[in-house]
Image (cartoon, rainbow, N blue to C red):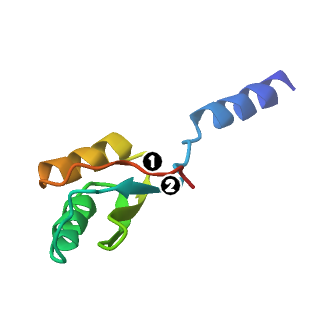
Amino acid sequence: MNRLFAVTLLAVLTTPVWAAPRTVTLSVPTMDCPVCPITVKKALTTVPGVTQAEVNFDKRVAIVTFDDARTNVDALTQATRNAGYPSTLAGGTK
């Protein structure tokens, strides 16, 4: 019985924790032309772990879905900043 408990405990402790997809909205207020969203989207989609990026020029936001085990909001905002479009977290996460 103790051996079964030990094996079960070992299996639970060594099982990988699965990452959850997260979606965030970034405010990108410096987009000032209709071509800007192309640059912002390209910057975001090159971040490892990003699975989708939709950029709305009229609302000046980017909605980004990513694997939270591979990247985070800081990496996303750094990517837009490096592309010339500073961003901040605009809303909560899903």
Residue at the top extreme of this rendering: 2
Q: Position of residue 2 (x, y in %)?
A: 83, 22
**Up-down: is 57 above or below 65?**
below
Q: Nearer the viewer, residue 29 or 14?
A: 29
Residue at the spot x=16%, y=72% of the render?
A: 33
Residue displayed at 21% across by 57% down? 30
Q: Which residue is under mark 1?
A: 68
| Residue at 13% across, 55% down | 83
77, 46: nearer the viewer: 77
5 or 83, nearer to the observer: 83
- For the residues bearing labels 2 and 1, Cβ distance under 8 angstroms: yes
Q: Residue furthest bottom?
A: 34
Determine whether the residue tagged by mark 1 lies in a helix, strand or loop. loop
Q: Position of residue 19 (x, y in %)?
A: 51, 49
Please, which residue is most extreme toward the right here?
1
State which quadrant residue 63 falls in: bottom left
**Residue occupying image coordinates x 36% and y 63%:** 61
User: Which residue type carries mark 1?
Assistant: Asp
Query: Considering only vertical position in the picture, is 90 above or below 60?
Result: above
Residue 80: give x, y in percent of width and height. Answer: 21, 53
Q: Nearer the viewer, residue 36 or 5?
A: 36
Query: From what the image shows, is residue 74 above or below residue 54?
Result: above
Q: Earlier in the sequence, mark 2 or mark 1?
A: 2
Residue 35, labelled with which disc? none
Figure check: 58 above or below 93:
below
Locate residue 71 relative to residue 46 in the image: left or right. Answer: right
Q: Residues within 10 Å of mark 1 (few under 14, many from 20)?
A: some
**Quadrant where the C terminus is found in the figure:** bottom right
Q: Secondary structure at mark 2?
A: strand
Q: Which mark is residue 22?
A: 2
CA distance separating discs 2 and 1: 6 Å
Q: Quadrant of residue 72?
A: top left
